Amino acid sequence: MSMYAVTDPVTGTLVESYSEITQEGLEGALARVTAAHAHWSLVPVAERGAVIHRVAELHRERAQELAAAITREMGKPLDQAVAEVEFSADIYDFYAERAEALLADEPIELLGGEGTALVRKASFGPLLGIMPWNFPAYQVARFAGPNLVIGNTILLKHAPQCPESAAIIEQIFVDAGVVDGAYTNIYATNEQIETVIADPRVRGVSLTGSERAGSAVAALAGKHLKKVVLELGGSDPFILLSTDDLDGAVEAAVAGRLDNTGQSCNAAKRFVVADGLYDAFLDKFTTALAAVQPADPTAEGTVIGPLSSEAAADRLDDQVQRAVAQGATVALAGSRDGRFFTPTVLTGVTPDNDAYREEFFGPVAVVYRAADEDDAVRIANDTPFGLGSYVFTTDAEQANRVADRLDVGMVYVNLVGADSPELPFGGVKRSGFGRELGRFGADEFVNKKLIRVG
């Protein structure tokens, strides 16, 4: 049976399965994406930008269709799925509008000698993208958008539970007028992906996924001397040091934890609260979370739906049970009903508890009491992850000071949910390396060619 299938996240019922690509089909895809690069990379930059603009337009025109598929595949509340598709369109527009500027020559001031020098940006070649299930459209946009504008071509392996949205997205690229083969969806097995990474025609790999998957892909890419970008999740701290609006801070904390039913890599997951605010915050935070109940993801206004799969619900349930068995206190007792999981809050998680260094991928929050600023920074950094972070304070100098001390790739001060196409996304430590979005995301898979003229 094929691993690519749509399974109703509410009932667990198989909706439709998709055939895995054959070895012959995979070889054909590799040949097409290579031939496409020879053509697409020579299309004038402005024309490539115009095609990617059309990709953005088609995302907006087909937002309801694509969003409905995402909801069917992984249970995202429909309102949020529509917003994801629209954000993806914004990303394509961002790169389409800036295509020529991003690829403009960069003159170099010579220290001596006559003549000129410049760096000219050129395409890298065919790239492999390995994408996750939690943001089926957005993850593709932040990888494919800049790279197609640059002139690279794309082989895209989506998560096995998202084959329908993968097919819809591929059709959008075809209908937008991307050169045949320049964006190719492949329903490939893990073993087949190993052969793709090893293939000399593929010049780079971008993966968003688990630490385990990232480690395996990075090792294989390194063996074959391929450039790789990894985004491997996080356990982002939400640090509350001072506030003149506790209710607003709590509202931000709830929003930061529950986006995508808590299944976002850069969601706030660990809440580090200054001693003087801890009790009041915990009381308001648990009350606000308790008021949010899982509901039908297709219903208007649903905040959290089911978790993405039975395995995801099993994993989260096991994590909570182990955390409690190892000494954590349950400040808000959630419950599980099939794939639905109500919000849960844990406190008293100590460094000897597995939960201290794990990522909870679902509506589970861990709250820590910090004695002072130094203690808050210590707790925030005491994790193998280093993706994003959130700092809430009324002291601007403190905000800058804490931001400098956090060992992460992103710091947001006094706001959550502020991702935007121009802002670079990525982390450090076991959260991976490399950046997506913004001009930094457009600089990963580029041949920065020096041209020195005497």
Image (tube, rainbow, N blue to C red):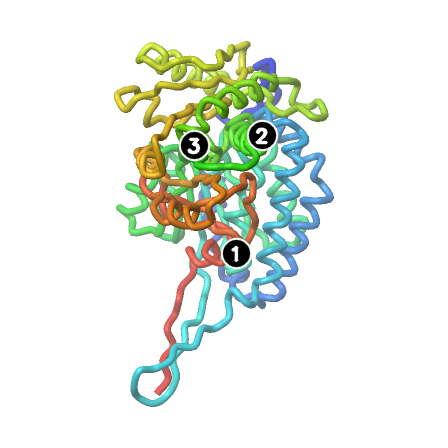
- CB contact under 8 Å: marks 3 and 2: no
Closer to viewer: mark 3 or mark 2: 2
Q: Which residue is mark 1?
A: 36
Residue shown at the point (46%, 19%) measured from the top left:
345
Q: 34 and 139: which one is in front?
A: 139
Residue shown at the point (46%, 20%) measured from the top left:
312
Q: Check the image and report above or below for 441 versus 44.
A: above
Looking at the image, can residue 193 be seen?
Answer: yes
Mark toward the start of the polypeptide (3 vs 1) = 1
- Crowdedness near tag 2: few (<14), some (14–19) or many (≥20) residues, C-alpha within 10 Å: some
User: What's the residue type where badge 3 is placed?
Assistant: Thr
- Dot 2 falls on a residue whose secondary structure is helix
Q: Which residue is mark 3?
A: 189
Mark toward the start of the polypeptide (1 vs 2) = 1
Residue 418 location (% of width, % of height): 56, 44
Q: Check the image and report above or below for 426 versus 343.
A: below
- Dot 1 falls on a residue whose secondary structure is helix
Q: Which residue is mark 2?
A: 247
